[in-house]
Amino acid sequence: MATFILKRVGLALITLWILSVIVFLAGQVLPGDPGRFVLGPLAAPSAVHALDHTFGTDRPVLTQYWSWISHFVQGDMGKSYTYQTAVAPLVIKALGNSLKLAAFVFVIVVPLGIAGGVWAALAAGKPRDRIISVVGLSSTVIPELVSGIVLIVVFGIALNVLPISATAPPGAGLPTQLYHLILPAIPLVLILFGYIEQMARAGTIEALNSDYARTAILKGLPRRTVITRHILRNSLLPTITVAATQVGYLIGGLVIVETLFHYQGIGSLIVTAATGRDFPMLEAGILVIGIVFMVATLVADILFSLLNPRIRYQAAE
Amino acid sequence: MSIDAMPVESAAAIKSGRRELRGEMVQELLRSKTFLVGAAILLFWILAAVLGPTLVPQDPYAQNLNLINHAPSSAHWFGTDQLGRDMFSRVIVGARSILIVAPLATLLGTVLGTALGLVMGYFRGLTDDIISRFVEAFLAMPVVIIGILGVTALGPSNGTVIAVIGIIFTPLIARTVRSAVLLERNLDYVAAARLRGEGSLYIMFVEILPNVLPPIVVEFTVRLGYAVFAIVTLTFLGFGIQPPSPDWGLDIFNNYGVVSAGYWWEVLFDALAIASLVVGVNLVANSIEQVIES
């Protein structure tokens, strides 16, 4: 088990390192002269040169990469071109806001998706199953941008029942904050519901057709016991992994939802940084998202292997 | 049995057999309701993209400052925007940019991804391992975020969006092609070609490629849906096509600030157009996938 985890952590670190190289190349080498971007086309070459020197972007590429990444791992993510302050506190604050929204979404969508999938599987092939599957599939293909706008127009404007700004007034308590997050959470819930529902449905159907389920039924156990004690335990396994791999999709969705609903999260931070060509902030935001994604995948893998003896034994061998 | 007695199909027979199979697939597609509905939606938007400018009631660029932010009416079915431009005309003509950019981006990704996947699957070994690591790192990031990074680095334009989305799709498609090639590379026909002394390039592109085409076709149609999704998102965030072109994502980007003032028609119809195109592409992709798999 320890070797399994070590191997996984090692792979994740290599992937993160490659990601950091990609982000660095795209952020600091491709765009050319950052001093020119900040000062504009009319600035004197000497001023541009001086600013490049302050940024440290006149040094060789390898030196730049090393100084960037070695500071990054110590928590120093550089200085924002736009705000002229350290990037790290801004990124961490934004990440906190995003995690709040993401957690809210997961708390809603995971039970909902699992319940929907199991409920559909218990009526496999019947109208109830088909309705749930069609709803799940169609909610997955509709872009968050579209569902977000429809929600804003219907609930925020026409009915005027929910706030269309995700940011609660300062000093508001948790209930008010969550109240402001209801509308932004729905597009993300819709996207994820389909995936989780389909995995839970497939897992449940597989478990229902298995020998141990048949044995349990033939043994005369009540249907409820068979479902809760034998079937759910097995069908939920793949669902957990799927839920964790969806963190990536969720973060992609956050970019749109946070922009649409004016929420100060990591998604809107990246958009703001990209619009202002604030590369240190952009790179930090993207790398932090990469780390979050890796950690989530890692936790899912480990959780899955802990819950699934087959993988645990394979890893031990 | 001697080797001479083995029934050997002529190349012509194999070719006609393939053509027959293709004909059957097309017939099965035409019988599928899912496909017909999806194709009808797609056809509608393709017609709008091609003929739109000649069909629409008003010039989508024409500003009319006496008609700013007017609600939908019989004169302006979808209302007017902040510059008094007719939203109906803009939505219809707006199909053009996405229907050019999305297929080109997907095609670029498919061509690059197929080449990369063939190399990875055929050579395996170290080449495969190294490329796989990069693919993995790429896949770790949401498409939209890599897209923002790429477009910011290269400057926003349609060409950049095509290049960036194409490059993002490359590893995804390469992964699919790679696993299909892994199944093919040990088959007899590949060994035979190798014994004939054919070069690796010939074997990859002439022998193996035709046999892995079905998953590539499926991958292309599925990716096309994602491309629409990703491009609309990038344009909405301000990283795609630039004003004043009529474009769904761009119009939403420009107008969503005034939605809270009650001017919902300036974004809703664009959003619904996006939804219908995405649904149409997905319906077609699903039915093609089903036909090819059966």
Image (tube, coloured by chain):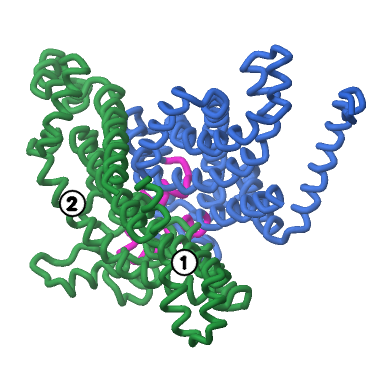
Q: Position of residue A250 (x, y in %)?
A: 35, 54
| Residue at figure coordinates x 36%, y 53% from the top left | A312
| Residue at figure coordinates x 32%, y 37% from the top left | A11
Residue A29 is marked as: none
Cα–Cα span, label 2 and label 1: 32 Å
Mark 2 or 1, which is nearer the eye?
1
Main SS, magenta region, reads: helix
Given the current orientation, which residue lies at the most extreme front position? A317
Residue A68 belongs to magenta span: no
Residue A200 is marked as: 1
In the shown orientation, is residue A71 left or right of residue B255? left
What chain is the green one? A
> Which chain is mark 1 on?
A
For the N terminus of chain B, give its image quadrant: top right
Hue used for the chain lettered B: blue
Tell me if residue A314 can be seen. yes
In the shown orientation, is residue B78 left or right of residue B185? left
Q: Name the quadrant containing residue B243.
A: top left
Amino acid at pointer 2 = Ala
Q: Position of residue B266 (x, y in %)?
A: 42, 58
What range of the chain is rendered magenta? B244-273
- Judge the density around disc 1: few (<14), some (14-19), many (≥20) Cα neighbours within 10 Å: many
Residue A94 is marked as: 2
Q: Is residue B10 above or below residue B173?
A: above
Tell me if residue A80 can be seen. no
